[in-house]
Amino acid sequence: MKKLLALAVALILLGPSAALIGVGVLMNPAATAACLPGSLIVGEVPDSLTATTRVGEMVTLNKTQLTHAATIITVGARTAGVGRPGVVIALMAALTESTLRMLANTSAYPESANYPNDGDGGDHDSLGLFQMRPASGWGTVAELMDPTYQARAFYGGQTGPNYPSPRGLLDIPGWQQLDPGAAAQAVEVSAYPDRYQNYQPVAEAILAALTRPVTSGGGGGDSAPVVPETTRLVFPLPEGSWVRTSPFGWRDDPITGERAFHAGSDFAAVDGTPIYAIADGAVVFAGPSGGYGNLIVIEHTVAGQRVASYYGHMWDTGIYVSAGETVTAGQHIGDVGSNGKSTGPHLHLEIHPGGYGADPVDADAWLTDHGAEGITPSDAAPAACTAGGA
């Protein structure tokens, strides 16, 4: 913390004024695209789908199998930190283990036939979509015959039903850097570790077929993204990694010296500190934007209201999402930088109730009022050492 306080004293940080929104964001072609691919919002499930594996085999899936895939996608979209890469890995695993069938196992567990199933499997004492074993601690027979439970267990993490063991995907250190097949194997611990890569093209075809594109909400028009109610709210920086440097409101611009309105809240942090999405949502803009440097804009649904969050000043290499992607609360979307109108590494955060392009409010106060994880009412005031900052 002493290092952070010294950083706050040494740096004069600022974020752009609200006037930059119209110039920097709305004139960017990416912000006004009519249709943006990459959503995790499941649309109508087709009656069948045929796709080709990596080795050239044709696979045809029926509506029941695709409905299980939809469950895996939906659970992944609602699980912080998973994103599209994690969903692809989960689909690869379920395709390999069960061909996306909810399998009973009457030889090991006769009672498994009493639950909805798509047939009887016979792989030792494994059950369900991901062929999980009660004896290994994945859950009871009743739990493992529930597709939603199995998907949650596969993704794992601190909210997973199996935490901390056996490990789900989110419990595998550095899973994002692994080959997708290797990541699936790290969870499944199969005797045949090379099988999963074969189904990656099929998993990607399923995801493309079952999810619908998110439309841009630029300017707050009728083309706003359809985003489910968020499951949680979080502060966008890791606990203990930041200090406040410039609050929302009128101030003397640290560069021009002129009186100007500061539309966001600035948080000093070490260059490269992870930035998290504050809530589940859809990315409607990600890229260069005037004084913001690199900017990410995400639209959310919070307490039934459309809300946009803006994250500014990332370096070119410190932005990890694209327009059209669906993200989850707490997902690592970028890294702290000092690009654009900035004199030191920090996050410039804005909150816009009403959505993309609507008027901003005090981000600090909004997060506190809405009970975001990682922030308390005592955090609401800027640190005394930052007086006159940015």
Image: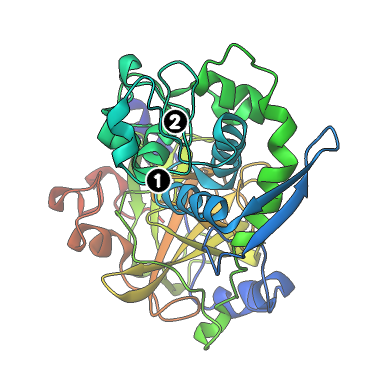
Q: Nearer the viewer, residue 148 or 369?
A: 148
**From the viewer's perspective, is 265 left or right of 326?**
left
Residue 323 appearing in the image? no
> What residue is disc 1 on?
79
Looking at this view, is 367 or 105 the one in front? 105
Question: What residue lies at 70% left-to-right and 38% top-to-bottom?
Answer: 200
Give the residue type at disc 2: Leu
Q: Residues within 10 Å of mark 2 (few under 14, many from 20)?
A: many
What is the quadrant of the N terminus in the image? top left
Q: Quadrant of residue 143?
A: top left
Q: Which mark is residue 170?
A: 2
290 shown above or below 197: below
Q: Find residue 279 and report its image quarter.
A: bottom left
In the image, 186 versus 276, the foreground residue is: 186
State the residue at coordinates (40%, 80%).
359
- 226 left or right, relative to 106: right
Per the model, the C-alpha gap separating discs 1 and 2 is 10 Å
Q: Are marks 1 and 2 in contact (CB under 8 Å)?
A: yes
Q: What colouring style does the render use?
A: rainbow
Q: Position of residue 311 (x, y in %)?
A: 49, 57
Q: Which mark is residue 177?
A: none
